[in-house]
Image: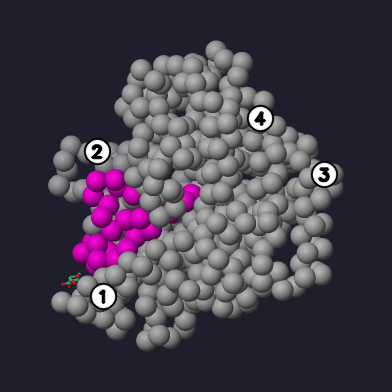
Amino acid sequence: MAPKVRYSPKEKVLHAIPASFLSHAKFGFYFFLFFSSWFLLVFTCFPSLARGGGPPPSQSTARADGDQFSAAGAVGTCPEGIARFYVYELPPEFNHALLHRCRTLNIYTDMCPHVANRGLGQPIPRPPDDPLRRLHGSWYATHQFIAEMIFHARAERHPCRTRDPLAAELFYVPFYGGLHASSNFRQPDLVERDRLAVELADYLVAQPAWRRRAGGDHFLALGRTAWDFMRNDAGEGSADFGANRLLRLPAVANMSVLTVERQPWKGRNQFGIPYPSYFHPRAAAEVAAWQDVVRRSRRTHLFAFVGGPRKGLGKAAVRETILRQCGASRRCRRVECEAGSRRCHDPDRVVEAMMGSEFCMQPPGDSFTRRSVFDAVLAGCVPVFFSEHTAYTQYGWYLPAGAEQYSVFLKGEERWGRIEAELEKIPPEEVVRLRHRVVELIPSLTYAHPNASHLAFRDAVDVALARLTQGVRRRHRLVTEE
Ligand SMILES: *[C@@H]1O[C@H](CO)[C@@H](O)[C@H](O)[C@H]1NC(C)=O
Ligand SMILES: *[C@@H]1O[C@H](CO)[C@@H](O)[C@H](O)[C@H]1NC(C)=O
């Protein structure tokens, strides 16, 4: 019998390229025009500003993560706090060769449109009267499980990359493990299912650079959840849902593993990175302009739910009550995601619904985390969580320590049952404060365009590299002090 495949309904339907556009953002059109022309003026007339000589005021939130970064933002300068890193040139079967069979990389979805443009996917075309046309080239219909490709593309052009292993403090292993896993879930022969992972480990331990720190300075970035790489052959009552054993291999256990969802209890060496959303800016000014559009968005609904029901899953039980309450309230905006519906995979529709709502429901589904959380942040919609494992135990590198600063946590069935009443209790000035904090998170939770050459903000990849740098330097100090 073929093993059960843990494919989510959300994966079964994938969008065509959307033709609609963010009509909802039209109100911000003049504001946006004003700001874009203003930035253009400022950067043309005062080039010193572009080099970090003193930021225009509304750029400040895009630079929330530290001034030294933007000061070092000149082309090709490796900013302070990020170590020189080496990118392995792996044999192609570990990454690029997988893309040759993009049609079969996922049993439900033809991945060919999604692996295009180094994983950004297809550009979202903008009609001539679209207020976002100025951001044309920065919006893509990006697949939720493709972070590993975007990370690779960004890393290859990163100013801290070195081609000399002896000069590197960190070693990036660009294995497209998520794409490989999703093409292999139905492989009943477990040895065959694990083969590529085992070959990767063998390849790595044979490298001279590995021996320096036994892999402690090496890292992987994976676009699927850690669960997909942690099959437990001892059984422990868990059905085989198609996972391989990559993260259980001794060599990989010595590395740092970046993943869109860590295993909250056993993922000691696992670190949560954002799911990619749709905005891939090339410059801080673009981020600031988008943040202004989002801040001024007219929010006609109190809450929104973009998603569908899940059957027979304990942690997803809350979805039933959310759907019921949303259907019964005129203050809830719903984008349905039943199998066969393309709507919830249409980036414009999703972002528009979220930009028109104050709060966005983020219940667990097939796993604890959701890409939707990052879409909500991009739209300035305050996320409402029902499990601490949807964000709080996942993205410690990216989110402020105080969850109440940027989110609402409805813990327990009693509070799930009255979502509208719970949200109404929050005073309007508190809602504004929450949203402000959410909008400030946009730059660091965004994957910048891989061709961006001098970013004056820290994107998701920069934050990960800075945290990996701290980790490897701390461990090195410990070792040398012993
Ligand atoms: C980056 O730039 C190169 C050369 O300028 C171009 O060929 C490539 O398509 C660009 N990459 C993306 C993802 O747009
Ligand atoms: C993992 O690290 C430990 C401790 O540094 C080391 O003894 C072991 O050989 C490493 N494993 C591999 C496969 O390199």
Residue at x 76% of width, y 67% of height: 43
Q: Is residue 208 above or below residue 395?
A: below
Q: Amino acid at mark 1?
A: Arg
Q: Nearer the viewer, residue 124 or 162?
A: 162
Q: Is mark 3 within 8 Å of ligand 1?
A: no
10 Å crowding of disc 1: few (<14), some (14-19), many (20+): few
Q: Dividing the image into 4 quarters, which one contains the C terminus?
A: bottom left
Q: Which mark is residue 477?
A: 1
10 Å crowding of disc 3: few (<14), some (14-19), many (20+): few
Residue 418 in the image: state x and y as whole percent: 45, 16
Q: Earlier in the sequence, mark 3 or mark 4?
A: 3
- Give the side of residue 359 with respect to residue 312, left or right: right
Residue 129 visible: yes
Distance of label 2 from label 1 (alpha carbons): 43 Å
Q: Nearer the viewer, mark 2 or mark 1?
A: 1
Residue at x 67% of width, y 63% of height: 55
Q: Secondary structure at mark 3?
A: helix
Q: Earlier in the sequence, mark 2 or mark 4?
A: 2
Find residue 305 and report its image quarter.
top right
Q: Which mark is residue 299?
A: 4
10 Å crowding of disc 4: few (<14), some (14-19), many (20+): some
Q: Amino acid at mark 4?
A: Arg
| Region of the chain picked out in magenta, as a range | 249-275
Q: Amino acid at mark 2?
A: Ala
Q: Is mark 2 within 8 Å of ligand 2?
A: no
Residue 333 in the image: state x and y as whole percent: 60, 24
Residue 90 in the image: state x and y as whole percent: 41, 74
Residue 274 inside the magenta-drawn segment: yes
10 Å crowding of disc 2: few (<14), some (14-19), many (20+): few
Q: Dividing the image into 4 quarters, which one contains the N terminus?
A: top left
